[in-house]
Every structure is written in structure tokens, then in C-alpha cells.
Amino acid sequence: MVKNTKNEPFSWGSIQSPFFVLAPLDGITSSPFRRVCKKLGADVVFSEMIAADAVFYKSEKTLKMMSFHEEERPYIIQIFGKDLEKMAVSAKWIEENIKPDGIDINMGCPAKKVVSGGRGSALLQDFDLALKIAKAVRDATKLPLSIKMRLGWDEFNIHEFAQRLEKIGVDAITIHGRTKSQGFKGEPDWKAIGEIKKLVSIPVIGNGNVVNAEDSKKIINTSGCDGVMVGRGALGNPWIFQSMKEGKDYKPTWEETVEVALWHLEMSVEEFGGKKGIFDMRKHYGWYFKGFDGASELRKKLVVAENIKEVQDILKK
Ligand SMILES: Cc1cc2nc3c(=O)[nH]c(=O)nc-3n(C[C@H](O)[C@H](O)[C@H](O)COP(=O)(O)O)c2cc1C
């Protein structure tokens, strides 16, 4: 049985509500950023989406993308795909070899490269296939299984689908309160998340445009969701998890921000090596230092720094 750091098995049903989750963000939620968010208060963290086909064929790059550190637990690996056998085999392989605390299936991604292959949110156009995939993965692994989805493809119609997922044995669902057709436009419909919450008894995690403590109170009050998932709101602001827990926004000082950004950079270099580690951090600088005086000048200097020492020198000035 998988144990978390407290030596208890993780289950979606046993975390105290409300709980706060770092969303899967392709190209962003790698291990160093997950460790930052976990340390600063995230209750659960998700991997970036992982192609089940790539796990099936043992792509070195993909296997490396799934690696994690013990302090990230509970750590959920999100897979995407549309082939039943590859989804099931990869979930089992992940359970046995990577040993995360849960598997999540991506049924929400609207990106062209994902949807055009019939994966991600495209599965919301074919509930029968989506249910078969969920069942195949359910049967293949004993790990907690969650599904991340949107309100529907082009209309809000996941009511019965959510109930059928629960019947299959899915342990939790995350709902981003928009349809696929909406992309990231408009306001997410948190009330709609509440409609689904009333129909199922497994935990429902609400998601979409939560960027501060006030939003997290509102999404919980509006939808009755058990947990809140935050994606873009955590970029440069991993303190958001603490803010949501305390119900009051925490504003880090310049010194704290520098300390966390440098720690993030050190982990990034350690994890990916000098070149990629430094490169990967470049997108984070703008997010971390947004709002401080001279932020855009600072960012310009940081994105050309080539090693940790150069970054440290720039930040000390
Ligand atoms: C850059 C980026 C990458 C994303 N990658 C994934 C992903 O890998 N898997 C997934 O299910 N959703 C992905 N999403 C969607 C987020 O997990 C989340 O559902 C969405 O951003 C809404 O939440 P937010 O408003 O808190 O960001 C991504 C979103 C963004 C902006």
C-alpha cells in the first residue's frame, strides 16, 4: 500500500475539507515548483499531464517528467490518452514503478495538439468512451483515481456522466467551471460545479480563476466544493495556499520572494542540470517579481543570467 509521509495511505475521502490543490500545468508544475507549493501550504500537488502512449513506450523523457521527491506527497500523476489498453497499462506501470499517491485522468485539456487526437476534453464528446477509459484505469490500479474535466464540450452536460464515474469507482472529480468551447474566456461558472457536487458523494474539487483568499471562499460558498484547485493563481504566488487556508491574503516581502525564487532555482538546476534548470526558471522570474518596483527591468536582467551566481548577484543589488 502506498504511504504518505505521515505513513498513512492517501485517499481523497480522508483529507479534511476544504483542501487546496496545485493544478496540473503543462510545462510548469515540474518537481521543483511542486516542492515550493507543497512547502508553502498546498495539500496535494499534480504532475504536468503525461501522455499515456509515451509511458506505454517507455519514453525516457516522459519517465523523467514523472519523478518526484517524497516531500511532495500526496503527489498525483495525471495521464492523458484515448486508448484503453495504453491508459490501463501505463496507470499500472506508474503505480508499480513511480509509486505516486494517485492517478488522475485528463478530460479537460482544450489544447489543439491534445484534442485533435481525441484526448483531453475531446473525451467529453464521447461519454461512453470516456467511461470505458475510466473503468479500464480503475480496474488496472488500486491507487486513488480522480478525473479532471470541464463542464462539457460546448454545453454544460456532465451531470449523468459524473454520477456514472462515481459508480465505476472514481474517487474524486475536479471540475474547471467552463466548457471546452469557452477555452479560458469569460467567468467560470462555480454554481454549475455546485450542481454536480449535489449529484455525487465523492469529493468534488472546484477550479477556475481562483487567484486569492476571497475567491477561494467564494468558490467554496457558491459550489460547496470539498477542495479548491489553483493553477495560474499560484504562478509567482505559491503563498496562495497559505492565504486560502488563513482566509486572508499573505503578501510576501521582497526578501521572502528572493529567498523562495532562489531556492526554486537551486532545485531546478539540481533536478535538470545547469542549462535546462536555468532556462526553465526564466518564465518564473516575471511571475515572482511582478508588482515590485523595477520588476520589468529586473526580469530583463534575470532572463539573460546564465548561472545561479549571476542570478544571486542581480537579486542582491
Ligand atoms: C499553461 C497551462 C497549462 C495547463 N496544463 C494542464 C495540464 O497539463 N492538465 C490539465 O488537466 N489542465 C491543464 N491546464 C488547466 C489548469 O489545470 C486549470 O484547470 C486551468 O488553468 C483553470 O484553473 P486556474 O484558473 O486556476 O488557472 C493548464 C492551464 C494552463 C494555463
Image (cartoon, rainbow, N blue to C red):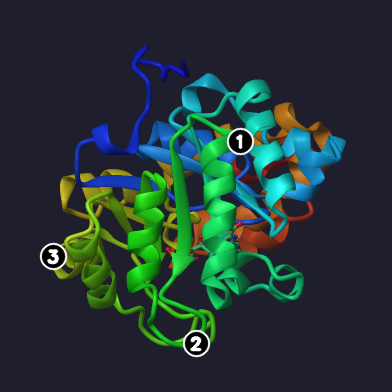
The 10 Å Cα crowd at callout 3, few under 14, some 14 to 19, many 20 or more, is few
Residue type at tag 2: Asp
Residue drawn at x 40%, y 16% as measured from the top left: 5
The secondary structure type at the circle numbered 3 is helix
What residue is disc 1 on?
31
| 12 shown above or below 26 | above
Report the quarter where the C terminus lies. top right
Residue drawn at x 41%, y 87% as measured from the top left: 186
Front residue of this view, candidates 100 and 124: 124
**Residue 150 at what x, y percent from top left?**
45, 71
What residue is disc 2 on?
154
Q: Classify residue 122 as left or right of residue 162.
A: right
**Camera-side mark, 3 or 2:** 2
**Residue 118 at what x, y percent from top left?**
70, 70
| 78 shown above or below 72 | below
**Residue 303 at what x, y percent from top left?**
73, 55
